């Protein structure tokens, strides 16, 4: 869904240009351009002078509705149904379009008004129609900056679609809330340790994991 993808890019602080949509959606450039033009005509997207795409009021309202239901569905799937963490994103993508507003309200009460989804992302506020700017570095960036210990905060929506990558993270207990030390960078990877042994995390994956840096930790080394 295009408006949802633009919203996700905003959340990650990535300029929403058509090339990024092509990458995220796995579609051809002509197909993306055609759909973007249609969404502009429908009043859901606008194209800025710098070629970035921006959600209109109606587009943002739609994106927030979808993402709110998606993330509530993820909480239900984990907290109530007990589906494995690495599978909930893909399943919630099926649910987000069939959850009515009435069911959404019931889910909020059932789940005791959760603020974050199982991947650490904020469940957006329908009234505000926006999402908070996290401003957190990725694991890759934290390693480049010489950070020592970090707490895993959240996972990119784009990463969550990769079940193998999510299974890898789950298998090494690299989930939101986990505290790890960045041991070193090693070629195109970051080596971290949660106390149970070093784990080599590919840069592509690490760039989609956002962390909070501890100011008291020793700096990482570079190999």
Image (cartoon, rainbow, N blue to C red):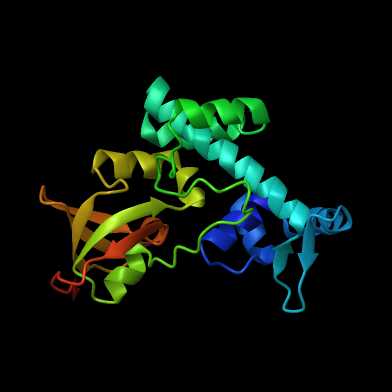
Q: Give the residue at x 87% y 52%.
A: 42
Is residue 77 left or right of 93 when viewed as pictured?
Answer: left
Residue 165 in the image, given as x and y percentages of width and height: 38, 45
At x 79%, y 64%, the residue is 46
Image quadrant where residue 96 sits: top right
201 or 3: nearer the eye?
3
Task: Determine whether 123 is above or below 149 in the image.
Answer: above
Query: Height in image: 125 above or below 52?
Result: above
| Count of picture labels | 0
x then y, percent, for residue 151: 26, 57
Q: Furthest residue to the right? A: 41
Q: Is residue 26 visible?
A: no
Looking at the image, residue 201 sits to the left or right of residue 85; the answer is left
Q: Quadrant of residue 22?
A: bottom right
Residue beneath the point at 52% across and 28% down: 107
Rendered-image quadrant of the C terminus: bottom left
Residue at 69% from the left image edge and 54% from the top image edge: 60
Q: Position of residue 59 (x, y in %)?
A: 74, 53
Quarter assignment of residue 102: top right
Report if residue 177 is visible in the image: yes
Q: Residue furthest top?
A: 81
């Amino acid at each position: 869904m295009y408006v949802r993808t633009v919203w996700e890019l905003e959340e990650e602080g990535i300029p929403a240009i058509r090339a990024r949509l092509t990458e995220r959606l796995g579609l051809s450039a002509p197909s993306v351009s055609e759909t973007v033009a249609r969404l502009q005509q429908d009043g859901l997207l606008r194209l800025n002078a710098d070629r970035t795409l921006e959600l209109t009021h109606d587009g943002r309202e739609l994106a927030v509705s979808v993402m709110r239901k998606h993330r509530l569905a993820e909480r239900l799937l984990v907290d109530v149904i007990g589906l494995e963490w690495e599978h909930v994103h893909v399943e919630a993508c099926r649910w987000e379009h069939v959850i009515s507003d009435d069911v959404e309200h019931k889910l909020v009460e059932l789940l005791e008004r959760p603020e974050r989804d199982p991947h650490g992302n904020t469940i957006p506020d329908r009234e505000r129609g926006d999402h908070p700017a996290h401003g957190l570095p990725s694991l890759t960036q934290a390693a480049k900056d010489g950070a020592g210990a970090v707490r895993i905060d959240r996972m990119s929506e784009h990463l969550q679609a990769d079940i193998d990558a999510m299974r890898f993270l789950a298998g090494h207990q690299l989930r939101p809330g986990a505290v790890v030390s960045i041991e070193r960078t090693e070629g195109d990877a970051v080596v971290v340790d949660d106390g149970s042994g070093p784990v080599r995390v590919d840069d592509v994956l690490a760039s989609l994991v956002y962390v909070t840096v501890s100011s008291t930790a020793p700096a990482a080394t570079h190999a």
